[in-house]
């Protein structure tokens, strides 16, 4: 198996659509389909259930997805390290900093320059990675620190809360609900919603589901999107109402209203994740993040 096969598997698993996965990878759909088939042949099992209408992970696919993400991250670090050595830099250590989609990237951007001042000999390698994959990578010691969302059942990893973020709805300005200052889950129970895939943010999905259950409402997701910008684009196109977290929005989407949800469980904790015994550099970045979020 090779990198193309792993990238195809992860992209299809996160998009649950071969066409969107191909667009994301800037490859033709037949190339992505062939790569997935080659990987399935090498593994001896199916990774996806495929029908004419939907794509879903099999049990094997769900089990192997975190390993595939970790393998791609390790390959990226291998390339970074190899380039540094080829350039004659044999003294610098590295810190891989993983960050999940929908987290507050501005917070990380404010802290990284200060970390470079404190630890000038450390190569800092940012890496996009879902929270569940961060936990796996931290246990395997392939990353030094992660920023993600609180999730249940985490052992061997320490989580510190950076902020508590409220779920918000992205509503077209012309929609009848756009006049509301807040929205309850009951008011959204009959509306088609767009949000993130479970594979990208399982903790956020579980929290959102709990919010709707607590409010006695049905969660009707009609489409998922890999980024908040994709969600906003679909809302602007009239597909439905988007659900995200406030920290994911770095600007007011034109033509849309951002309306906070109200009721039980309508918030989620953004956390910084480290091993039980973090490196000096990881501990320094953790403390910078905690100080910046408190300020």
Image: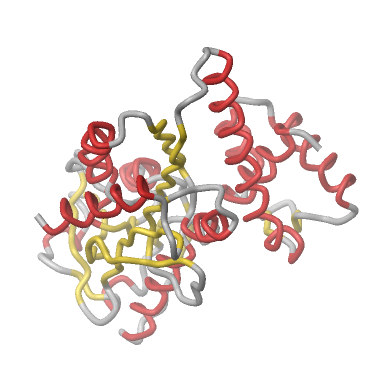
User: Relative to the observer, which residue lies in front, 85 or 131?
Assistant: 85
Q: Residue 49: horizontal and vertical position, in percent?
A: 76, 58
Name the residue at 30% across, 53% down: 286
Name the residue at 27% across, 49% down: 104
Relative to 283, residue 187 above or below: below
Q: Quadrant of residue 3?
A: top right
| Quadrant, the N terminus | top right
Relative to 176, residue 113 above or below: above
User: Relative to the observer, which residue lies in front, 113 or 225?
Assistant: 113
Residue 104 in view in this figure:
yes
Q: Return the residue found at the far top.
A: 87
Q: Residue 25: horizontal and vertical position, in percent?
A: 59, 30
- Count the labels in the image: 0
Q: Residue 153: horizontal and vertical position, in percent?
A: 50, 77
Q: Residue 17: horizontal and vertical position, in percent?
A: 62, 46
Name the residue at 68% across, 26% down: 28
Q: Quadrant of residue 244?
A: bottom left
Relative to 4, residue 280 above or below: below
Name the residue at 38% across, 73% down: 207
User: Relative to the observer, which residue lies in front, 234 or 150?
Assistant: 150
User: Relative to the observer, which residue lies in front, 179 or 34?
Assistant: 34
Q: Quadrant of residue 185?
A: bottom left
Q: Return the residue found at the far front.
A: 91
| Quadrant, the C terminus | bottom left
Relative to 108, residue 2 above or below: above
């Amino acid at each position: 198996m090779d990198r193309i096969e792993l990238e195809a598997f992860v992209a299809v698993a996160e998009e649950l659509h071969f066409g969107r996965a191909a667009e994301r990878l800037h490859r033709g759909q037949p190339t992505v389909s062939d790569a997935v088939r080659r990987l399935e042949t090498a593994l001896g099992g199916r990774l996806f259930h495929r029908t004419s209408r939907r794509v879903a992970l099999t049990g094997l696919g769900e089990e192997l997805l975190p390993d595939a993400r970790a393998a791609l991250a390790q390959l990226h670090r291998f390339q970074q390290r190899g380039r540094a050595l080829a350039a004659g830099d044999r003294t610098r250590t590295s810190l891989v900093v993983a960050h999940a989609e929908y987290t507050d990237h501005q917070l990380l951007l404010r802290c990284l320059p200060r970390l470079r001042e404190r630890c000038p000999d450390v190569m800092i390698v940012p890496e996009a990675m879902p929270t569940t994959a961060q936990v796996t990578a931290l246990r395997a010691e392939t990353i030094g620190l992660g920023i993600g969302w609180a999730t249940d059942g985490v052992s061997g990893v320490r989580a510190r809360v950076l902020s508590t973020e409220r779920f918000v709805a992205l509503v077209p300005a012309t929609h009848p609900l756009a006049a509301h200052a807040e929205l309850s889950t009951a008011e959204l129970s009959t509306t088609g919603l767009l949000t993130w895939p479970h594979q990208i943010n399982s903790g956020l999905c579980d929290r959102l589901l709990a919010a709707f259950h607590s409010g006695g409402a049905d969660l009707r997701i009609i489409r998922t999107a890999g980024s908040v910008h994709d969600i906003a684009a679909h809302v602007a196109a009239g597909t439905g109402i988007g659900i995200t977290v406030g920290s994911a929005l770095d600007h007011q989407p034109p033509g849309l209203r951002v309306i906070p949800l109200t009721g039980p469980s309508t918030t989620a904790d953004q956390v910084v994740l480290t091993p039980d015994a973090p490196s000096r550099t990881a501990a320094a970045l953790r403390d910078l993040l905690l100080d910046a979020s408190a300020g």
